Image (spheres, rainbow, N blue to C red):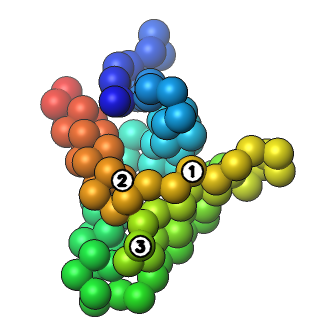
Amino acid sequence: MLRFHRDAAGDPRAHAGKGRELLARWLESDVQGSAASARKVLAAIDKVAAGKLDDWERTGNAYTLTLAPDGAEIEPDLDEEAEPLHLSLAELREAVVGWVEFLEKD
C-alpha cells in the first residue's frame, strides 16, 4: 500500500509497505513531481501489456525501470547491494496512477 504526501518544502513524497520501499523511492527520485513523466510510464505499461511493445526500459536519476509482458523490474543504479524489485504490470500501473492522481489533486 502506498501513501502520498507533500513535505515541508512542498515536494511529493511516497511511503510504501514492507517490501515495496523501492517503489516509493523510485516514484520520488525518478518520476518526481512530473505527471507527464508518469503518464509516459503508464503509456509504456499499457503498450507492453497489450503486446504492442516487447519490452521497454528507462533509466532515471537513480533507478532503471524495465517492463516486459511478465512484469516490471525496478533496479537501483546507485546501490550495488540492493536487490531489484519485481512487480506485475498491474501493480506498477496502480502505483503510477495513484501518483498521478496525487500530483494532480493540488
Give the residue at the far top of this rendering.
Answer: 8
Question: Of helix, strand and loop, which one carries label 1?
Answer: strand
Residue 85, numbered label: 1
Residue 104 screen position, x and y as percent: 20, 37
Identified by mark 2, the residue type is: Leu
Of the image marks 2 and 1, the number of the one nearer the N terminus: 1
Quadrant (top left, top right, bottom left, bottom right) of the N terminus:
top left
Task: Please state if 77 lies on the left or on the right of 57 as rendered.
Answer: right
Of the image marks 1 and 3, the number of the one nearer the N terminus: 3
What residue is drawn where x is 44% and y is 28%?
16
Identified by mark 1, the residue type is: Leu
Q: Residues within 10 Å of mark 1 (few under 14, many from 20)?
A: some
Residue 70, numbered label: 3
What residue is drawn where x is 78% and y is 49%?
78
Marks 2 and 1, how far apart at CA: 11 Å
**Residue 73 visible (yes or no):** yes
Q: Which residue is mark 2?
A: 92
